[in-house]
Image: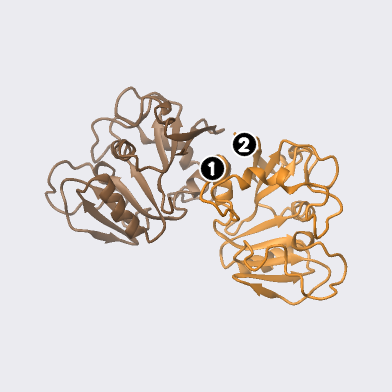
Chain colours: A orange, B brown
Amino acid sequence: MSQLLRVQNFNVSLDGIGAGDDQSLERPFGHVDPGDLFAWAGATASWPNRTDPGGSRGLDDYFTRDFAHNIGAEIMGRNKFGPQRGPWKDYEWKGWWGEEPPFHTPVFVMTHHLRPSFTLSDTTFHFTDADPATVLEQAREAAQGKDVRLGGGATVIREFLDADLVDTMHIAVSPIELGSGVRLWESPKELTDRFHLEIVPSPSGVTHHLFWRK
Amino acid sequence: MSQLLRVQNFNVSLDGIGAGDDQSLERPFGHVDPGDLFAWAGATASWPNRTDPGGSRGLDDYFTRDFAHNIGAEIMGRNKFGPQRGPWKDYEWKGWWGEEPPFHTPVFVMTHHLRPSFTLSDTTFHFTDADPATVLEQAREAAQGKDVRLGGGATVIREFLDADLVDTMHIAVSPIELGSGVRLWESPKELTDRFHLEIVPSPSGVTHHLFWRK
């Protein structure tokens, strides 16, 4: 356990949905308004996209400012990287995040459709079609002794949970119901055979779920 | 506010006591058993003195692992540095922490009894008899753009609160009553005219109090 695999600040609805159906360039979260899920994080002082000096410095801020703590690499699914499906038509798409992606480490994008690695600022994106255990091995080596963040979406987190590769998990549950979409769980209790679970309500209305291995 | 002055992981009893009376070499917290106040932190995976690989990774761990986040210097009172009173007889005392102090930054010890600076591992201790605002100025310069931690004890925190120099404060309130000793407050409500306050109960029994400036 010297290099943990950590889910950090992943957001789902009360009914366990992490993103909507019908993702597109215009709607990265499909029919779901990401503001409904992320509002708690955007209100904090440490939110990476914050441009004004304000923001709260209470409980929620501990979670946003822990996002990069001792993280040396990230693993994400292709749908977190972009809305395209199937083979790449070209390599112009470089993620949703512009010239300064918020990762600042190597990122491993899991996809059956490979393309060359590229670097934007201090983030390098690699593309891999390996199984979860192999991708984790690659990411751990790239992380140079630090932990690896499992960035999502929900489908990728499920794959790593099913392979029993996840060490800690912070899931922020927002007080909305979405009905359909990409589901992380039916209930967090599905995981309590393998994980300790602390449920911490925040004054912002979100409920932080903290899991770590038994 | 680009360089905050932050109190991190300071511990008090239900009745606001941070340390006991009659501090000595054998009893750094006087009549108070520090285990009663610090047990929540010692149980976490990120506790700096942990020697085994276990420990919890729930809410309390966020606080222990945030201790050094973006901190570039610490300010502490003389009683946190040592049990001596009055002029130094010699300079053999180098703090409670052995050869590897847990600060890893410059530390400014406030005392009327000056002595030369010295370095242990990656911590350098400076001694100053300046007023709080001046000490903060020195510490900010030493912190090179990072935040400054106000390490306590309670008397020093009170001095900086009275001078309105504190930006954020995390106080862990343990479920014990101590009756007498060095007091931080009669009630946390004394501070809510100037600070936002979130009160977050932890499953460990401690109650985290998070303050930030209005």
Q: Which mark is residue A204?
A: 2
Q: Amino acid at mark 1?
A: Ser
Residue drawn at (56%, 65%) of the image: A145
**Residue at point 72% right, 35% down?**
A175
Q: Quadrant of the C terminus of chain A?
A: top right
Q: Are marks 1 and 2 on the same chain?
A: yes
Q: In the drawing, does residue B72 fall left or right of residue B23?
A: right
Q: Residues within 10 Å of mark 2 (few under 14, many from 20)?
A: some
- Decide: marks 1, 2 in contact (CB < 8 A)? yes
Query: Picture coordinates of residue A29 (x, y %)?
Result: 78, 52
In space, the residues marked 1 and 2 are separated at their CA atoms by 10 Å
Chain at numbered mark 2:
A
Instruction: Out of A142 and B16, give the one closest to the viewer.
Output: B16
Classify mark 2: helix, strand or loop.
loop
Q: Residue at x 34, y 39 (%)?
A: B164
Left or right, B179 with respect to B203, comes to: left
Give the percent coordinates (x, y) of residue B176: 42, 25
Is A153 situated above or below A193? below
Position of residue B9 relative to residue A91, above or below, is above
Q: Would residue B5 be found to the left or right of residue A12 on screen?
A: left
Q: Quadrant of the N terminus of chain A?
A: bottom right
Residue holding disc 1: A56
Q: Position of residue A36 (x, y in %)?
A: 72, 43
Any part of residue B28 in sight: yes
Amino acid tagged 2: Ser
Closest to the observer, A123 or B120: A123
Q: Position of residue B129 (x, y in %)?
A: 19, 48
- First of labels 1, 2 by sequence position: 1
